């Protein structure tokens, strides 16, 4: 059983305000991002048994060996993805619970999101629908190949870690676009921002992070 999406109880305004305050202290300054995080009920994306911990700044299990990302990481990656602009079309790899998707859905026009574990994909689809979010399409595939049909993307966000940046994602990024991706081994990775210019790709290293691996089904 899941908590209801309207969230009596756990979503108390004070609890969410405490989380926003903490994100500010950790350096998240983009009011658009803080506003979106304040508006999305994170507790509906986790199991009822741990819903009381949903507004703590920690990753939590969502089954199938996967986790819902820590709010700080969601905020940081979203802030980096937006930059000074407002990407219209975004590709997300690693839908997971759908929480990051729901935050992004408030900030960009269209999202194409890919998940490789079917029950997670179906659950995320259901939750987003119940929350009235309509600008997201989710499909089941290996996100390392991107989603060519809707490319190019103004922004690409990857929430599982490959050993190196998949070339398909670089190809599907529009000139002027931003790719945010953790890259590295199983224990720890580096969060990268890759910006595509008209002629080149420029890579910036942001911070150390800890994501589940990006599992390649097609290679
Ligand atoms: N942003 C999500 C994070 C989920 S964890 C959230 O906040 O809930 C990362 C997710 O990436 C997992 O659900 C995992 O199944 C998925 N994943 C791993 N490799 C993948 C791949 N190659 N393609 C698509 N999804 C993948």
Image (spheres, grey):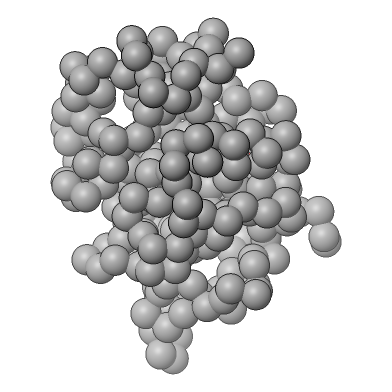
Please give the name of the residue rendered at 32% of the width and 42% of the height, measured from the top-left corner. 75
Please give the name of the residue rendered at 73% of the width and 56% of the height, measured from the top-left corner. 142
| Residue 30 left/right relative to 73 | left
Identify the image quadrant of the C terminus: bottom right
Please give the name of the residue rendered at 35% of the width and 67% of the height, measured from the top-left corner. 87
Q: Is residue 182 visible?
A: no
Identify the image quadrant of the N terminus: top right
Residue placed most toward the observer, 65 or 199: 65
Tell me: residue 150, above or below residue 71. below
Tell me: residue 148, above or below residue 28. below
User: x and y percent of residue 61 in the render?
Assistant: 58, 22
- Count of labels shown? 0
Q: Quadrant of residue 194?
A: bottom left
Tell me: residue 172, above or below residue 157. below
User: x and y percent of residue 184 in the render?
Assistant: 58, 50
| Residue 88 left/right relative to 91 | left
User: x and y percent of residue 162 in the render?
Assistant: 63, 53
User: x and y percent of residue 35 in the render?
Assistant: 22, 41
Please give the name of the residue rendered at 39% of the width and 63% of the height, measured from the top-left corner. 109
Q: Is residue 149 visible?
A: yes
């Amino acid at each position: 059983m899941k908590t209801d999406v309207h969230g009596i109880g756990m979503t108390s305004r004070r609890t969410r305000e405490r989380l926003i305050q903490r994100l500010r202290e950790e350096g998240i300054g983009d009011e658009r991002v803080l506003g979106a995080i304040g508006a999305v009920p994170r507790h509906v994306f986790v199991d009822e048994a741990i819903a009381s911990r949903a507004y703590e700044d920690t990753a939590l299990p969502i089954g199938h060996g996967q986790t819902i990302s820590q709010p700080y990481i969601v905020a940081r990656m979203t802030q980096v993805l937006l930059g000074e602009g407002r990407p219209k079309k975004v590709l997300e790899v690693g839908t997971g619970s759908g929480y990051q998707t729901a935050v992004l859905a408030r900030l960009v026009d269209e999202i194409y999101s890919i998940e490789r574990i079917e029950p997670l994909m179906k659950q995320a689809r259901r939750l987003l629908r119940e929350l009235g979010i309509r600008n997201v399409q989710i499909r089941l595939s290996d996100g390392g190949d991107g989603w060519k049909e809707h490319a190019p993307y103004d922004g690409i966000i990857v929430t599982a870690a490959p050993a190196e940046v998949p070339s398909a994602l670089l190809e599907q990024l529009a000139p002027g676009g931003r790719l945010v991706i953790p890259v590295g081994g199983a224990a720890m990775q580096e969060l990268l921002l890759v910006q595509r210019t008209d002629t080149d790709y420029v890579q910036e290293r942001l911070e150390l992070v800890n994501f589940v691996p990006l599992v390649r089904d097609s290679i």
